[in-house]
Amino acid sequence: MTTTPDFTDYEIKIAHDTLKERYRRDVPVQLADVEVRLHLEDRVLVERPAIYWEDGKCHFVVIKLDKARFHSQFYYGLHQQYGTGRTEYDDLFECIMTLLKLQADYQAKEEAD
């Protein structure tokens, strides 16, 4: 059981609004619980709330580490997982925007190759 509070209605609205601005359409998000290691050296997985969405073949997840800390990543499959280079953010909007920008950069590079 998680001790981290679920995403608030306000945080969900931030996600919806940010994704709508990026994609110019409503993007359905799903609330989920995920198991993560809070630190690389941790052996034990802990359950945390997450927001999940897809765009094409890309999957995105924003994990709420505690009341005001977030982690994000995007992935195309088990062997193609990417983070932002930061382990956590204290601002959800910045977390999502950075994730979207890095994924767009990654996609543009892949299409150029």
Image: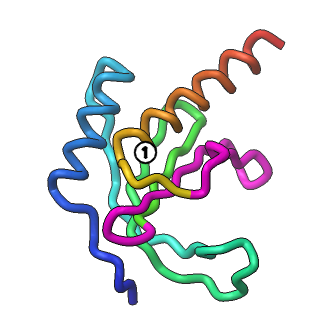
Q: Is residue 3 above or below residue 78?
A: below
What colour scheme has been applied to the protein in the rendered image? rainbow
Q: Nearer the viewer, residue 18 or 67?
A: 67
Q: Quadrant of the C terminus?
A: top right
Q: Nearer the viewer, residue 19 or 92?
A: 92
Task: Specify the segment rendered in magenta.
Answer: 65-87
Name the residue located 45 percent from the left edge and 69 percent from the top edge.
65
Q: To which residue does mark 1 refer?
A: 53
Q: Point out the residue furthest to the top here.
A: 112
Q: Point out the residue furthest to the right here.
A: 113
| Residue 10 drawn at (x, y percent) | 16, 51
Badge 1 marks a residue whose secondary structure is strand
| Residue 99 drawn at (x, y percent) | 52, 38
Q: Point out the residue furthest to the left here.
A: 9
Relative to 50, 8 lies left or right: left
Name the residue located 28 percent from the left edge and 75 percent from the top edge.
5
Task: Give residue 15's quadrant in the image.
Answer: top left
Name the residue located 34 percent from the left edge and 32 percent from the top edge.
19
Q: Please, what is the dominant secondary structure of the magenta stretch?
A: strand
Q: Quadrant of the N terminus?
A: bottom left
Name the residue located 79 percent from the left edge and 51 percent from the top edge.
79
| Residue 50 drawn at (x, y percent) | 41, 62
Q: Nearer the viewer, residue 104 or 54?
A: 104
| Residue 21 drawn at (x, y percent) | 30, 22
Q: Is residue 111 above or below residue 8?
A: above
* Residue 13 drawn in magenta: no
Q: Amino acid at mark 1?
A: Trp
* Residue 79 drawn in magenta: yes
Q: Is residue 66 above or below residue 89?
A: below
